[in-house]
Structures are given as structure tokens and as C-alpha cells.
Image (cartoon, rainbow, N blue to C red):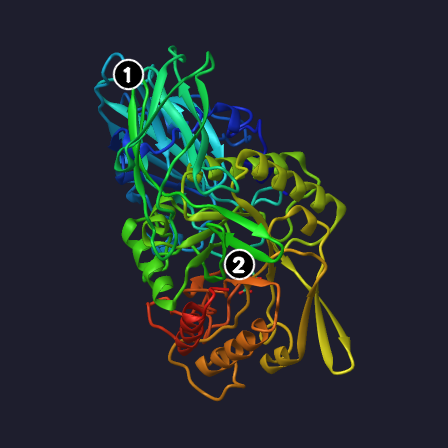
């Protein structure tokens, strides 16, 4: 690793001189949609800075004078040398990846500085927070020429309190976003998706009372369908309050007292219509403290495993899924709008899904809320992908932090049933320790949901049959096993799936979390010709026949809903920097395999019982 890269990525580095990122944020404010907010989205001034001259001098020492871009300094005289100017450097839209906004930035990895100004009149008794939906990958944030802090990780939200720093007029907010890949990062240098950089999710000012409802967990207790058990956390100088939880549609109202730490834990019975994909019932839940009241639409359902079954609301369910990346349906850039979420999830519904695997990192909040509303169960994942630095404690800390931020944002979404802590990670003692820590974190932070990981199976060939064994040292720690396999694409011919028998060492449900093959939409030929729709369709046919024979299979999420950009996919005619395993092309056209899978999912849907 060169020094600049090390400098950019290690805590305590020169360019981000504020120490450990996580310690600086305000605790995450849940459900900001229910607060008094002001959007800072729109066109921001942007300076592309591949050599980090806005942060470091020519000896790679941190700039502290007016040459530092976050000072937004203007020459005070004709003779003063100032070598940057936000006002004439062009603009980028926020939210949005920079790669698809300017042709010259498609492959760019490095720093971009963003700036926007705002005025703000805060009610004197209130507090003000700056909320970022996500910035990929490192973000250093400055307000009015002073550092606020930094954040590492490209897919989770973070806040800073700016109550004492905001002015009524002429605030200027500057961010340096750096998406340089690093070995010690999460994800690491090697992935199969586009490294979209930028302020990729909304930026919002959130004004709350001095003591406000920071977060709450209102969910059915594990193993029950009638008992709500949870907690609530206030933040501010009046932590001891009476708080009431109301669900007016069923006439429910319960009052509790928070303790000196602002926390209340509660448990009460409730007779509610349960959320399910067939009936995604959401209730308006009001949470009222003495100083603030928030409302959120929340669904209630139970999710458990019993031997090899997954039980939704106490009944076995087969997860008819599809995997997807967070890419806009037809523009092939980062997705972030409600419309993007609606289009992607409508395709999944049309396919006959009741489940989506949101790979390989936490998707934006709209996806989760839309899944709640539309009735799709969700597998949510952290980007612990392939070969992370298992021995590095900072890498573990970073992964834990990303997992915690994902859980904090989404823990009231009924749709969310599975947390996945990893994808295709090579077995070793260090990896097992690392993943066990994440599994334990997920279980202890949210005991109501299932924890999984996408593992890889091993083949044993005996006579003319192939036995595929699910065996992994962390399998015992997981609630549900995920497995990725590419029979018919990276290994073997599609029809060899017919002679495969699957065995598992564990009495646990299995989700085939990936399988698939590439096809270029509109390219036709015989089923043995790579890249044709016929090849992909044939592969799906043999896969489905094989999956039907796996007794402990409880779900599947083939790879993938839509073609997506990937720098690994260089073959000009067929790939052109796209992974073509989509059932839908990057222009929204459905390939023939889409309809084959749809037919199978319809059969499953009509079969009784559901599994
Ligand atoms: C995998 C990975 C996924 C890739 C896919 C592929 O196993 O989990 O991220 O995109 O294979 O297409 O090779």
C-alpha cells in the first residue's frame, strides 16, 4: 500500500486527522422522516481532487491554512494565491454517484470535494443535526471551515450535531468523499460491483427538541405473535419522562417511565393483524414523550426457524426470492429514489417473489420501507465480501460498526427477516472468529431476526453422482444457511445439476442465496452457446429441477434481478463492464429466464401448503 492510500484509510491519518470515526457521530436518529427536516439535496459545487491537494501539502502534511479546501477561502487581494474555487469548478447532484454524472468520472476512484451553502433559523430551544443517508466510502465533514468529523463505510447513515455551530446566514458545508479501495476496508479491494463514489443518499437537517426520541424498537417478541417487546431511548437533558405508545387502529395505549439514562423497556400484549407478503399490514404507531412525538408505520410478524423450516407467523414459508444490487432500474447508477425502489421491487413481485436478497451491502432506506409496504421479505447484508482482512482488529471494528448502523436504521421494518454477515468468505480460523463476532453482535443487538451468511459448498464425486455438502465451521452459529453455487456457469455444464445430491451436516434451513449465468438480452442461439438467453434459460431449468430435490431447502435468491455494472467484466461484445446475470437487462427488458422462473414461482405459490 502506498503512503497516501494508507494515510487516507487509517484512523488517525493526516488527511482525516480526527481519530476514530465512529466515536464522533451523534447517535443515529431513527425515523428522520417523522421529524422536522430540511433537505440539502440538489446541485452542490464539486472539485475533483485525484491527488488530495485540498487536504495535503506537497510533503503530504495536512493543510491547515486557507489552502485547505474546506476553508472555502477566496483571494482577499489581487496578489493572493488561492489555487481552488468551488464556485467555478462545476456541480454534482446530491444524492447521486459521481461516476454516472460525468463521463470522465465513470472509473474514477479518489477524492471529490462537495460544497453547499445554507441559511437556517433554529428555534432557540431546539437542537439541530446533520444527517447523511450514505457517502461512499470515506467522508470527512466540515461546517463553516471547521471539522465536524468523519465516517467510514459507504452504505449506512450517520449524523453530526451542529446545534452550536450553525449560523442564521451563510453556513457552508464541505465534504471530502474518497472512494479509493483499501485492503483493510469493508468491502476490500476486490468486488464484483461498481465502486460508485459520492454522497449517494440524501443529506438532511433534522431539528428536534432539546430532549428527543432518539430511537425505539417496537417489535413482536421472538416466538410470539401477540406480545410486543421493545425499548425506547431519549436523548437530552430531561431523560426521565412519561412516554406513551399508541396504536390507535386497535385502541392500544401504554404508558411507561424512562429512567435516568432516558431508557424504557416494555412488553405488552397486542391483538394485531400480522404482516405477511400476502397481507403487508402496517399500523400507525405513535410514540409520545413529554417533549416530542413521532409516528411510524410499523408491521408486526414473527420469524423463526424450526429444524429445516423457516416459520413466518408460526407457519412454514418457502422464500421465493431474487438477489439485487442497489442500481437504478434503467440508468445503471446508484439507486436511491422511492421510484427506483418501487420499480425494482415491482419486477420482483411480477416474478412471483415474496423475498429479496439485498446484496451485498445495506441498501437505501426507501428499499426497506417499500418492501414493508409492498410485502417482500428482506435479506439485508453487510459488505463482508470475499477476502476481508480477518486478522485486522480495525477491519472487524469497521464491519461491526456498519452492521450496527444497518440494524439501527432498519430494526422496525417487518420486511427485514434476515441479517447476513458475509458473502463467500474462505474458511480459516481468523475468518471464523471474525464472523462469529458479527453473528453474536447481530443476535444480541436484535434477538428477533435470523442471522445468515452466503457460504460455499464442497463437491464429492462418486461413481456417476455428485454429492454437494454444506459444511462450514460457522454454520452452527447461524440460524439459516445461505449457499452460493454456479453449477452450469463457472463449473460444470447446466445439465450436470441433474446428477447432484445435496446433503447438509446441520438440521437448519438452507437458502440457495445465488446461482445463475450470464445472457445478453436479445442474443439468441442454441442452449449450449454462452451469453445467449437460451443458455441462461436452460441453466435455470436444470437448477430448478435440482433445487426441487433438496429436502432442507427453504428458499432461493438467484443471481440476479438486473444486469449491473462491474469493472471485472471486461469482455466487449457481451459484457462491456456489465455483469449480465440479470433476468432483466440494464434497459429493463426481460430475458426468457425471467418467465421460466416466474412460472416456477407461480407453481410454488399455488402449491399447498406453501412450503
Ligand atoms: C458471486 C458473488 C456475486 C457475483 C457473482 C458472479 O458468487 O457473490 O457478487 O456477482 O458471483 O456473477 O460471479
- The picture places residue 219, in percent across and down from the top left corner, at 43, 37
Which quarter of the picture shows residue 46?
top left
Q: Residue shown at 65%/60% (left/top)?
A: 456
Looking at the image, residue 172 lies above or below residue 334: above
Can see residue 83?
Answer: no
- The picture places residue 300, in percent across and down from the top left corner, at 40, 43
- The picture places residue 122, in percent across and down from the top left corner, at 24, 18
- Foreground: 277 or 543? 277
Q: Which mark is residue 126?
A: 1
- Foreground: 10 or 280? 280
- Foreground: 30 or 125? 30
Pointers 1 and 2 in contact (CB under 8 A)?
Answer: no
Looking at the image, residue 451 lies above or below residue 14: below
Can see residue 426?
Answer: yes
Q: Which mark is residue 192?
A: 2
Q: Residue shown at 31%/21% (left/top)?
A: 128
> How many numbered marks appear?
2
Crowd class of label 1 (few under 14; some 14 to 19; many from 20; radius 10 Å) = few
Q: Which mark is residue 602?
A: none
Ligand 1 contact, mark 2 (Cβ < 8 Å):
yes
Mark toward the start of the polypeptide (1 vs 2): 1
> In the structure shown, which secondary structural element does the residue marked by tag 2 occupy?
loop
Q: Residue shown at 67%/46% (left/top)?
A: 477
Q: CA distance from mark 1 to mark 2?
A: 45 Å
> In the structure shown, which secondary structural element does the residue marked by tag 1 occupy?
loop
Task: Give left or right: position of 342 versus 55.
Answer: left
Amino acid at each position: 500500500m502506498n503512503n497516501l492510500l494508507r494515510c487516507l484509510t487509517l484512523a488517525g491519518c493526516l488527511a482525516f486527522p480526527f481519530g476514530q470515526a465512529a466515536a464522533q457521530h451523534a447517535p443515529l436518529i431513527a425515523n428522520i422522516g417523522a421529524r422536522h427536516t430540511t433537505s440539502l439535496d440538489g446541485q452542490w459545487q464539486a472539485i475533483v481532487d485525484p491527488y488530495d491537494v485540498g487536504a495535503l501539502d506537497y510533503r503530504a502534511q495536512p493543510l491547515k491554512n486557507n489552502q485547505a479546501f474546506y476553508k472555502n477561502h477566496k483571494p482577499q487581494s489581487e496578489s493572493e494565491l488561492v489555487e481552488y474555487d468551488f464556485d467555478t469548478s462545476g456541480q454534482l447532484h446530491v444524492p447521486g454517484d459521481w461516476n454516472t454524472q460525468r463521463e470522465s468520472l465513470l472509473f474514477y476512484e479518489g477524492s471529490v470535494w462537495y460544497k453547499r451553502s445554507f441559511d437556517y433559523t433554529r428555534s432557540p430551544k431546539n437542537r439541530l443535526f446533520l444527517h447523511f443517508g450514505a457517502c461512499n466510502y470515506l467522508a470527512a465533514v466540515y461546517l463553516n471551515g471547521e471539522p465536524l468529523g468523519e465516517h467510514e463505510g459507504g452504505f449506512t447513515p450517520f449524523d453530526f450535531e451542529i446545534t452550536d455551530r450553525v449560523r442564521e446566514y451563510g453556513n457552508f458545508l464541505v465534504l471530502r468523499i474518497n472512494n479509493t479501495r483499501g485492503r483493510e476496508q469493508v468491502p476490500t479491494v476486490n468486488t464484483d460491483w461498481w465502486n460508485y463514489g459520492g454522497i449517494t443518499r440524501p443529506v438532511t437537517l433534522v431539528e428536534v427538541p432539546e430532549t428527543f426520541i432518539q430511537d425505539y424498537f417496537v417489535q413482536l417478541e421472538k416466538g410470539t405473535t401477540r406480545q410486543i417487546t421493545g425499548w425506547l431511548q431519549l436523548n437530552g437533558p430531561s431523560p426521565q419522562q412519561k412516554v406513551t405508545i399508541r396504536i390507535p387502529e386497535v385502541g392500544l395505549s401504554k404508558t411507561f417511565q424512562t429512567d435516568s439514562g432516558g431508557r424504557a423497556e416494555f412488553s405488552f400484549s397486542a391483538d394485531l393483524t400480522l404482516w405477511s407478503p400476502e397481507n403487508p399490514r402496517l399500523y400507525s404507531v405513535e410514540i409520545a414523550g413529554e417533549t416530542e412525538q413521532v409516528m411510524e408505520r410499523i408491521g408486526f410478524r414473527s420469524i423463526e426457524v424450526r429444524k429445516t423450516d423457516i416459520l413466518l407467523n408460526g407457519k412454514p414459508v418457502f422464500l421465493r426470492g431474487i438477489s439485487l444490487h442497489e442500481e437504478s432500474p434503467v440508468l445503471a447508477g446508484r439507486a436511491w429514489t422511492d421510484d427506483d425502489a418501487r420499480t425494482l421491487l415491482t419486477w420482483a413481485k411480477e416474478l412471483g417473489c415474496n423475498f429479496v436478497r439485498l446484496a451485498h451491502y445495506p441498501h437505501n432506506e426507501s428499499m426497506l420501507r417499500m418492501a414493508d409496504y409492498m410485502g417482500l421479505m428482506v435479506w439485508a447484508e453487510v459488505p463482508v465480501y470475499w477476502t476481508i482482512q480477518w486478522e485486522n482488529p480495525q477491519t472487524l471494528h469497521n464491519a461491526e460498526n456498519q452492521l450496527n448502523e444497518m440494524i439501527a436504521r432498519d430494526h422496525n421494518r417487518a420486511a427485514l427477516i434476515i441479517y447476513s454477515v458475509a458473502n463467500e468468505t474462505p474458511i480459516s480460523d481468523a475468518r471464523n472468529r471474525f464472523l462469529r463476532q458479527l453473528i453474536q453482535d447481530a443476535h444480541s443487538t436484535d434477538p428477533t431476526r435470523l442471522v445468515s451468511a452466503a457460504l460455499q459448498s464442497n463437491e464429492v464425486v462418486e461413481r456417476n453422482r455428485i454429492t454437494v455438502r454444506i459444511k462450514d465451521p460457522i454454520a452452527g452459529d447461524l440460524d439459516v444457511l445461505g449457499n452460493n453455487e454456479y453449477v452450469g456457469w463457472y463449473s460444470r455444464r447446466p445439465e450436470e445439476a441433474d446428477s447432484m445430491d445435496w446433503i447438509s451436516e446441520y438440521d437448519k434451513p438452507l437458502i440457495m442465496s445465488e446461482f445463475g449465468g450470464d445472457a445478453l438480452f436479445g442474443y439468441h442461439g442454441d442452449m449450449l452457446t454462452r451469453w445467449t438467453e437460451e443458455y441462461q434459460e436452460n441453466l435455470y431449468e436444470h437448477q430448478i429441477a435440482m433445487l426441487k430435490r433438496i429436502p432442507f431447502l427453504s428458499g432461493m435468491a438467484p443471481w440476479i434481478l438486473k444486469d449491473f455494472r462491474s469493472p471485472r467484466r471486461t469482455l466487449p461484445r457481451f459484457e462491456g463492464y456489465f455483469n449480465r446475470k440479470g433476468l432483466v437487462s440494464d434497459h429493463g427488458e426481460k430475458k426468457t429466464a425471467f418467465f421460466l422462473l416466474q412460472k416456477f414461482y407461480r407453481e410454488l405459490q399455488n402449491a399447498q401448503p406453501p412450503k
